[in-house]
Image (cartoon, rainbow, N blue to C red):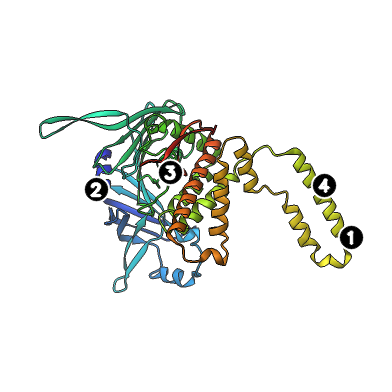
Amino acid sequence: MLDVDEAIDAFRRVALDIDCKHMVLTQHKHGGERFEGQGYIRQEGDGSLIFKIYVAKYNAKPLGHLDAMFNSAAGKLHSDEMFYDLEASAHDGTRWTASRILPVPHWDMTDLTVLMHGKMQSVTADLDMPQKRHHLVLHFFEEYQVPLHRVSETERHGNRHYTRDRAEFAALDSEFGVRVRDGSGDTVFEIASDKPFPTAFDLRVQESLQYITGKTAIWRVRFQSTDKSMELELASPWRKSSRTQFSPPLAPISAHFMEHGWKLFEKYLAYVVEKTDGTHWNPVAYHLYNACEATANSVDAWAVGVSVAVEAVSGLINVEGDKEKVERLALYQERARKWIDEQKDLADIAGRAKGQINAMSNKRPQDTLYALAKTGHVEKSYVDAWEYLRNRHVHPKLSDLQKPTPVDYQKLLDHIHRVETLLRQLTFYLIGYEGPFTDYGVHGKQTFTSKQYPLK
């Protein structure tokens, strides 16, 4: 029987080693290749999952993978039939599975034996562990700054210490427990509920952790209850930037972080659960992730990333427009199209002109942003900063590319911080959050200023 805690600890320490008495690799294709034999599942030095099969039985053409490789086209994604699925039975009886594998075969042409190995994005074990309640445990293998308001008693060198390392709260009919201990190299979410979890709840929790921390967070272990069992999934490291500079909505140094951090988490979690279909990322989470990753690169990439994110997120917001303005625009478009139809000598460009006239009805991000500024949901001066940053870095003129001075850099950083705050204000509006937030656009003494949302 698999010891789950021991397996997770070994995986965190990059020491996972599973000997398998039987492994089967099957191609995603009717009548496709199949390889069977003994082998193992292990980790490479960077934590990635790998497997190896000492093949004893197969139905493949020797060196057939070379034909597939030479017939592939440069720049095209692999077709589904290029991938393989893996089933493995460990010596302790645990059954492990993995999917969408691109294996690397090694043929010995002297006796036509073959050795199969390759990398796996994740591997899953289905464990016979019935649960009375629904459970989900996520390990992130990184220590994130989250509001911890409970303490645990520890002993060191015979002395007792109390460490603030836990948090407990309720959200979406579920009980949340969060553990982060200094030096553990791990952030753990333990969730229990009497009701089934929403679809892809692990991703929604992951997105919410990313939101309140302003950091890329990808879980490495998922331990979740199913109908009559528990599913343990171990995932290889996700490629991400090592040092990002994206600002969280509430700075950890803020006096409001402890009190309102999990409230903000709950609001965002409720939003992404309601507004996301299937197992894909929520659009807001996707745009915030891209903006976060862009901050690890040049200052210009940082500026472009947050500017594009504001434009994308504003496109998800519908505000009540000015009825009279809409009616006047429709009247103008009707008259303009009629005039163009009367210009017979301009028939060759009439279609293009009408397209531009019709495009005037499309909602512009500026319209949404300034409408929200009127109601106190975003800062108007930060909308102006976004227009400056967007025009200068997303659509630069030649004069914008001159060598900057220290004054120019300070102005650029100030605009970036204002646009990041604007981006957070847009998310507050979407998720219905009311409360304190950190305004990175205002210089404070040693720290940034806190404000209340919506704005006065």
Residue 74 percent location from the top left of the image: 49, 70
Left or right relative to 371: residue 173: left
For marks 3 and 4, give the one nearer the viewer: 3
In the image, which disc is placed on residue 331?
4
Q: Nearer the viewer, residue 310 or 179?
A: 310
Question: Mark 1 or mark 4, which has the lower sequence index?
Answer: 4
**Which residue position holds label 2?**
13
Q: Decide: is 101 above or below 345.
A: above
Left or right: 217 with respect to 434? Answer: left
Disc 1 residue type? Glu
> Could you tell me which residue is drawn at 45 percent across and 57 percent down?
407
The residue where tag 1 is placed is: 342
Mark pair 3, 1: CA separation: 58 Å
Tell me the mark number nearer the camera, choosing from 1 and 2: 1
Q: Which of marks 2 and 4 is in front?
A: 4
Residue type at mark 4 is Leu
Identify the residue at horizontal 65%, vertical 38% (top origin): 319
Q: Mark 3 points at which residue?
A: 443
How far apart marks 1 and 4 lie (CA) works out to 17 Å
